[in-house]
Amino acid sequence: MPNGNSVEHIHGRYNAKRIDTMMPYMLLRGIAEAQPFFERLERGEVSAYTSVLTFDELGYRLILALIKDRYAGSPLELLRDQEEKMLEEFAPNVASLLKRLRGYTHLTVLDVLVSDLDVMNEVMPQYHFRPRDALHYAAMQRVGCLNLASNDPDFDRIPTIERYTI
């Protein structure tokens, strides 16, 4: 299957997927295109992996998005200049959203291991990957799940990954 196929076309041996940050971000921000995939995940028609890193990225992006929804100006500058105030206002909602995501029975959250650093150090120069994406790949490789539900075309640089989009 070529990279960039629709995630809804995954069948049989493609049942398990690794999901990146953008997939749950779309779900938790109410973007309708993400809903069918997560409904299938909830029913157990598919299973998925993600990593602790995804929750870190997702929480940060959600905080910035909520700041942008409420305030004018740069959400990043507001967070930097008024961090405690912004986190007091938005962290409870973001924590609730992350807890909701963690509740999916068929979503396995992988730890980042020290051994993943070896893979990261190989992948970064070989495929011109950012360290965080290389760590995501290391976790995928470790569990043998190279089917990736992601809108990020950077992962197409690794020929062993089959990427699927919403």
Image (cartoon, grey):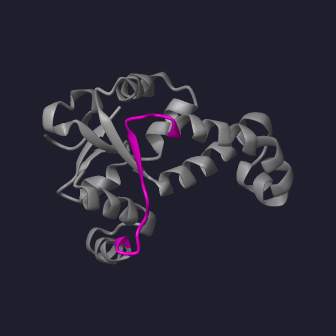
Screen quadrant of the N terminus: top left
Magenta extent: 102-116
- Nearer to me, 100 or 33: 100
Residue 46 in the image: state x and y as whole percent. Answer: 29, 31
Can the viewer see residue 65 in this picture?
no
Type of secondary structure dominating the magenta stretch: loop
Is residue 103 shown in magenta?
A: yes
| Point 26% across, 53% down: residue | 156
Q: Is residue 29 left or right of residue 80?
A: left
| Point 83% across, 59% down: residue | 81
Q: Is residue 65 left or right of residue 41?
A: right
The residue at the far front in this view is 105
Residue 66 in the image: state x and y as whole percent. Answer: 70, 38
| Point 51% across, 35% down: residue | 103
Residue 119 in the image: state x and y as whole percent. Answer: 30, 72
Screen quadrant of the C terminus: top left
| Point 46% across, 42% down: residue | 22
Labels in figure, total: 0
Can the viewer see residue 121 in this picture?
yes
Q: Kindly indicate the quadrant of the structure image that contains residue 48.
A: top left
Is residue 6 shown in magenta?
A: no
Q: Is residue 95 above or below residue 111?
A: above
Residue 160 in the image: state x and y as whole percent. Answer: 17, 56
